[in-house]
Image (tube, helix red, strand yellow):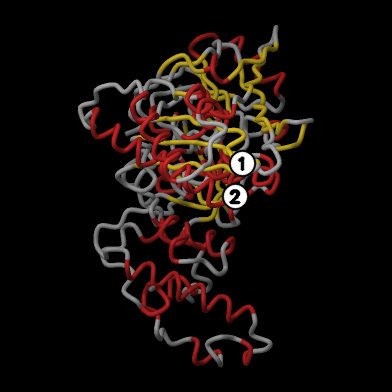
């Protein structure tokens, strides 16, 4: 399996890359880690006439604090996310989820910008971005804009990214003091995409749940935020009954689609399981 | 598409050849650099057989184009045994039957040469997590896990060689024997 022929450009600045992307038109495609585009090109599911290689744009590879946000450059590798002390402190959900992406060698190369732009329905980082309400910063030669994660993902493998736009960086809200996070997924083989994944953050105050986020990925064309359910679950004591009710509520609410490999019933059952595990893990961290 | 001149730095040596931009690094290493130790399996990033090091990090050479690697340092399996002496990891794989047909072995060695530098004292869970990216259809993985643990222990002991009494395994001589590895794995 070899890719179809393409011409190759290696810009040295974001400005260069944007100009090349604008000049290249719809036949041009950017490549960062290449861990999804590479297989698609080898299998000739993608045949871009021109590749614009972003790997020299180290200005896009940094993680830094920006007010009450963590600003993550689009070229940040999954391994960097999983190992970063800043991510661990301010956005633990992001680090936990990144640690489960693919395999060790894949994580060295794959990037957050690539994962969001590729928008696989079962991928980790789109779910985390949606659950946390991240903002995606896009740039083209002529304009800059910021899109909420909830509007960025349109459908499976489809985003609002225009042909001449690059993701420059993503802003994640910093975790509140005392906030705990957990990402849990179910897959048949280690390193595969999730059949179902749950992402959550919890804060507890005076023995009651003060804040809760809950998102599900893997079952639908774009990840789902169950924020109404999560809001309704606040104010209660986070005991086993609370977890049980919430997991059942999440499974019932899941707008699950029929899949030739996974029945609706099985995926609902798995949803209960991963939500229970995610909430249990997040609460156990608070007690620790 | 015209072929163009590409220069790669592989195992410390500069190699120049003509190829199209679409030439995979895996194919360039084998066909243009004459380094056939890097094996080609699935060609979509799943099997791990083609893993090489780029600037010290493990990378699937089948998901990388040779032209992208200009200016980077590539290390392949041919660089691992120094002067014909196996690395601690290769030696441990040899002793503990961590390979049978050997097709997956170069990828496993390159992955874990990097992994053990980053994780000198890995847990079995960490090893199995990293090993999940390398498919082996012969050994059943148990002996590979054992060999990685043995190599990690020997590499740690080599590092504290000036004070061998402090090393967990006792003298460096004793450390060279693959003892009680099964117990460590459980």
Chain ID at mark 2: A
Residue drawn 38% across the image and 37% down it: A193
Give left or right: position of B95 versus B140: right
Q: How many marks?
A: 2
Residue drawn 24% across the image and 27% down it: A264
Say whether marks 1 and 2 touch (CB < 8 Å). yes
Residue drawn 70% across the image and 34% down it: A70
Mark 2 residue element: helix
- Dot 1 alpha-carbon crowd within 10 angstroms: few under 14, some 14 to 19, many 20 or more: many
Give left or right: position of A144 versus A234: right
Q: Locate residue A87: give its quadrant.
A: top right
Residue drawn 36% across the image and 33% down it: A248
Residue B93 drawn at (x, y percent): 38, 72
Residue extending furthest right?
A67
Residue B17 drawn at (x, y percent): 51, 40
Image quarter of the C terminus of chain B: bottom left
Residue A126 drawn at (x, y percent): 50, 28
Mark 1 residue element: strand
Image quarter of the N terminus of chain B: top left
Give left or right: position of B164 versus A271: right
Along the line of sight, which residue is nearer the eye, A160 or A285? A285
Give left or right: position of A228 versus A18: left
Along the line of sight, which residue is nearer the eye, A133 or B72? A133
Q: Is residue A196 above or below residue A119?
A: below
User: Are the residues under marks 1 and 2 on the same chain?
Assistant: yes
Q: Nearer the viewer, mark 1 or mark 2?
A: 1
- Dot 2 alpha-carbon crowd within 10 angstroms: few under 14, some 14 to 19, many 20 or more: some
Chain ID at mark 1: A
Q: Which residue position holds label 2?
A: A286
Q: Which residue position holds label 1?
A: A204
Q: Locate residue A164: give its quadrant.
A: top right
Query: Sequence-wise, which precedes: disc 1 or disc 2?
Result: 1
């Amino acid at each position: 399996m070899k890719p179809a022929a393409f011409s190759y450009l290696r810009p040295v600045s974001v400005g260069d890359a944007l100009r090349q992307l604008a000049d290249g038109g719809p036949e041009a495609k950017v490549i960062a880690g290449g861990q999804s585009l590479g297989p698609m090109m080898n299998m000739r599911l993608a045949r871009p006439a021109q590749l614009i290689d972003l790997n020299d744009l180290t200005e896009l590879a940094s993680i830094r604090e920006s007010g009450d946000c963590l600003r993550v450059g689009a070229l940040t590798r999954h391994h960097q996310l999983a190992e970063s002390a800043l991510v661990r402190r301010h956005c633990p959900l992001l680090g936990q989820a990144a640690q489960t992406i693919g395999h060790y060698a894949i994580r060295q190369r794959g990037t957050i910008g690539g994962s969001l732009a590729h928008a696989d329905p079962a991928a980790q980082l789109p779910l985390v971005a949606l659950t946390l309400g991240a903002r995606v910063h896009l740039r083209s030669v002529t304009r800059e804009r910021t899109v909420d994660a909830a509007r960025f993902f349109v459908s499976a493998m489809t985003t609002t990214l225009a042909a001449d736009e690059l993701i420059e960086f993503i802003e994640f809200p910093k975790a509140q003091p005392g906030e705990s996070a957990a990402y849990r997924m179910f897959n048949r083989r280690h390193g595969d995409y999730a059949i179902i994944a749950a992402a959550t953050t919890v804060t507890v105050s005076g023995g009651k749940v003060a804040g809760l986020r809950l998102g599900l990925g893997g079952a639908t064309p774009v990840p789902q935020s169950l924020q109404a359910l999560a809001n309704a679950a606040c104010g209660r004591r986070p005991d086993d009954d609370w977890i049980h009710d919430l997991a059942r509520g999440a499974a019932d609410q899941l707008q699950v689609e029929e899949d030739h490999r996974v029945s609706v019933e099985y995926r609902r059952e798995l949803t209960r399981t991963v939500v229970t595990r995610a909430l249990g893990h997040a609460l156990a961290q608070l007690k620790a | 598409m015209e072929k163009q001149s590409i220069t790669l730095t592989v195992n410390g040596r500069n190699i120049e050849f003509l190829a199209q931009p679409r030439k995979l690094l895996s194919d360039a290493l084998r066909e243009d650099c004459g380094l056939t130790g890097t094996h080609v399996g699935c060609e979509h990033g799943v099997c791990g057989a083609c893993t090489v090091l780029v600037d010290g990090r493990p990378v699937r050479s089948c998901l990388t184009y040779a032209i992208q690697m200009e200016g980077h340092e590539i290390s392949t399996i041919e660089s691992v045994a120094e002067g014909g002496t196996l690395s601690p990891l290769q030696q441990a794989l040899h002793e503990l039957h961590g390979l049978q047909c050997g097709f997956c072995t170069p990828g496993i060695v390159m992955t874990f040469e990097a992994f053990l530098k980053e994780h000198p004292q890995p847990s079995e869970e960490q090893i199995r997590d990293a090993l999940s990216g390398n498919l082996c259809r012969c050994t059943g993985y148990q002996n590979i896990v054992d060999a990685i643990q043995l190599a990690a222990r020997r590499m740690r002991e080599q590092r504290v060689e000036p004070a061998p009494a402090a090393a967990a395994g006792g003298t460096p001589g004793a450390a060279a024997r693959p003892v009680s590895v099964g117990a460590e794995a459980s």
